[in-house]
Structures are given as C-alpha cells and as structure tokens.
C-alpha cells in the first residue's frame, strides 16, 4: 500500500496510511496499492472511528469504485459498490443489501494514534 501524506511528521513511519482528517467524515478514502492491479485499501470514517478494507467487492472481485478515490457512502453507515450497488456496513464490511448480501469485505487491521492511521498487519 502506498501511504498517503503525513503532515504531522516529516519522517516516514512504518505502516502509516493516512491522517484521520484526510478521510471525509462519513465517507471514504482510497489508499492505492503499490503494484498495478493489486487491490488497494478503502478507509471509512465516522467521527473518531475508522475501518479499513481491501478495495475489492466480493461480488465480482473488482474495486468498489469506478473513479479514483470516489466512493458513495450513506448516512455515515453504508458504503455502496459503484458497480451493482451492494451496500456494506462501515463497522464490519458486511453486505446487507445487493447481489452479494451476506458476503463481506476483507478487513485490514488498523490502529489510530494521535489521529494518524497505521496498518496493523
Ligand atoms: S461488483 Fe460490487 S456489487 Fe457487483
């Protein structure tokens, strides 16, 4: 994964993904993969909480978005796949409506330290 900018520290920090405030509250931020064709990560935010998932819809194993870093989120609760409108809960990535209902996004372990988000894998 390619880290987003880290304005809080000029030194690279292992596992840094982005600042919490880089993510729109109630929305999502894409962290592109290092290698072309590999799935990136989508980080969802609600207030002080964030959840990260592989940016790959379980329906067709393709990215959840059409355009770079463009996602549809509803009421800071659900993320919608841009292809066939599957709806995923922020908290656990579970598809609660759509063609892959009952399947889930693949979670990426993260931690938040001083409003900075790090990959915990
Ligand atoms: S590819 Fe996501 S709902 Fe079909």
Image: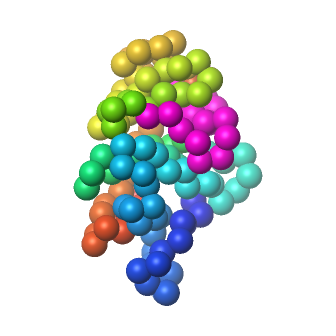
Residue drawn at (36%, 19%), measured in percent from left and top? 96
Q: Residue 38, percent across and down?
A: 66, 47
- 67 shown above or below 100: below
Query: Which of the 4 quarters of the picture holds residue 112?
Result: bottom left
Residue 65 visible? The answer is yes
Name the quarter showing ligand 1.
top right
65 is within the stretch colored magenta: yes
Residue drawn at (48%, 75%), measured in percent from left and top? 6
Query: Which of the 4 quarters of the picture holds residue 111?
Result: bottom left
- State the residue in front, 18 or 93: 18
- State the residue in front, 9 or 25: 25
In the rendered structure, which segment of residues is drawn in magenta? 57-73
Q: Which quarter of the figure is the C terminus placed in?
A: bottom left
- 69 shown above or below 57: below
Using residue 50 as the reference point, say whether residue 19 is left or right of it. right
Q: Residue 45, percent across and down?
A: 35, 48
- 93 shown above or below 27: above
- 96 shown above or below 81: above
Q: Which quarter of the figure is the N terminus placed in?
A: bottom right
Q: Residue 83, percent across and down?
A: 62, 23
Residue drawn at (70%, 56%), measured in percent from left and top? 35
């Amino acid at each position: 994964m390619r880290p987003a900018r880290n304005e809080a520290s000029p030194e690279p920090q292992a596992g840094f993904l982005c600042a919490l405030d880089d993510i729109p509250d109630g929305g999502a931020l894409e962290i592109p993969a290092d290698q072309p064709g590999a799935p990136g990560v989508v980080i969802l935010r609600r207030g002080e909480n964030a959840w990260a998932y592989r940016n790959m819809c379980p329906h067709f194993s393709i990215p959840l978005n059409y355009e770079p870093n463009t996602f549809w989120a509803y009421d800071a609760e659900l993320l919608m796949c841009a292809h066939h409108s599957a709806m995923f809960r922020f908290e656990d990535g579970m598809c609660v409506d759509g063609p892959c209902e009952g399947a889930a996004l693949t979670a990426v372990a993260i931690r938040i330290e001083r409003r900075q988000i790090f990959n915990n894998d």
